[in-house]
Image: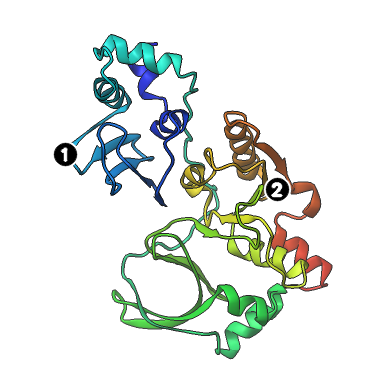
């Protein structure tokens, strides 16, 4: 194994092989107890986007090779770069990276000038009517959405929208005339009813997720769920699924070319995991483009 090959190996995979598991996971970052020194309070962060680490307890950091040399030194083994490359190769971890997938017709507004002014439970009649036309019962919407008052500081205009929260404190925004995002853009993670479930469901958008819940008469999934909020966020979902113990990943991605690419990426990722099987759910809502279109068709609804 050469240096370039070694640097393509995910640090989180190396740590998992060492039996070192996350203490906290946020979008793009994972926190561990340090593998290169003794500590009781976790301060070792891995940036899964750049595949680099930083130990805030002693100020060290770097790439996979730097981690390997530091770990070998800590365990009193030979720790040259050659030793590190040989050790990484012997771990039997395959390199895995995701190229962001973008939908050609995805023209969402990610305007930095949008500012949240207020948040409350859904009361706006227009938003209720919009949900009704989408086939989303208000009882389901109240559990997952908020009514947001947004100011566009560039135009000094205000508007009201449904807000679906993500893991980084942002919101997906929807109303009959607007589809956008209150930054930061990120995935949303929803725990299922069963602790440590065997399944994880991946939805492309929150309307698809709410449609699936509505098809279950409003009952939440027993398994966990990730709503990507954009195919470009697929790479953010990977740390949530790596070595967690899920046995099946169900994907509910759009029936189009971009959706097919994303579905293939999920299949390829699952093949790098032990005992994780991918089950695309597209046939359930084919020939419709997405879950919400299928749900609306079943209810004889049109926008």
Going 21% across and 44% down the picture, which residue do you hit? 56
Which of the two labelled residues, at mark 1 and mark 2, occupies the earlier sequence position? 1
SS at circle 2: loop
- Toward the left, the furthest residue is 59
One can see residue 303 in this view:
no
Image quarter in which the N terminus is found: top left
User: Between residues 176 and 193, which one lies in front from this camera angle?
Assistant: 193
Going 47% across and 35% down the picture, which residue do you hit? 99
Question: In this rendering, would 132 be left or right of 85?
Answer: right
Residue assigned mark 1:
59
Question: In this rendering, would 281 be left or right of 191?
Answer: right
At which x and y percent is residue 253?
65, 49
At which x and y percent is residue 62?
24, 31
* Residue 94 vertical placement versus 294 (above, below): above
On the image, which quarter does residue 6 sit in?
A: top left
- Residue 126's label in the rendered image is none
How crowded pointer 1 is (Cα within 10 Å; few <14, some 14-19, many 20+) is rated as few
Image quarter in which the C terminus is found: bottom right
Residue assigned mark 2:
255
Going 64% across and 41% down the picture, which residue do you hit? 257
At which x and y percent is residue 302?
75, 72
């Amino acid at each position: 194994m050469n240096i370039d090959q070694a640097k393509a190996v995910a640090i989180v995979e190396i740590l998992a092989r060492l039996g070192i598991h996350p203490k906290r996971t946020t979008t793009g970052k994972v926190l561990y107890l340090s593998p290169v020194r003794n500590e009781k309070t976790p301060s070792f962060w891995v940036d899964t986007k750049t595949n680099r680490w930083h130990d805030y307890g002693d100020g060290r950091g770097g790439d996979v090779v730097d981690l390997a040399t530091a770990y070998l030194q800590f365990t009193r083994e030979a720790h040259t770069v050659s030793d590190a490359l040989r050790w990484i190769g012997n771990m039997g971890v395959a390199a895995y990276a995701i190229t962001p997938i973008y939908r050609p017709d995805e023209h969402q507004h990610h305007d930095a000038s949008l500012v949240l002014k207020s948040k409350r439970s859904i009361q706006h009649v227009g938003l209720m009517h919009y949900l009704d036309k989408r086939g989303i019962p208000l009882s389901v919407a109240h559990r997952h959405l908020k009514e947001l008052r947004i100011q566009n500081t560039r135009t000094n205009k205000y508007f009201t929208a449904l807000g679906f929260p993500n893991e980084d404190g942002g919101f997906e925004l929807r109303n009959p005339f607007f589809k956008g995002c209150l930054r930061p853009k990120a995935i949303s993670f929803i725990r299922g009813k069963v602790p440590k479930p065997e399944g994880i469901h991946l939805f492309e958008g929150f309307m698809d997720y709410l449609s699936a819940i509505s098809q279950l008469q409003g009952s939440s999934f027993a398994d966990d769920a990730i709503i990507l909020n954009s195919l470009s966020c697929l790479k953010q979902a990977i740390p949530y699924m790596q070595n967690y113990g899920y046995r099946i990943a169900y994907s509910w991605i759009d029936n189009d070319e971009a959706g097919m690419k994303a579905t293939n990426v999920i299949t390829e990722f699952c093949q790098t995991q032990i005992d994780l099987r991918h089950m695309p759910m597209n046939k359930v809502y084919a020939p419709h483009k997405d879950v919400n279109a299928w749900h609306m068709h079943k209810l004889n609804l049109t926008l």
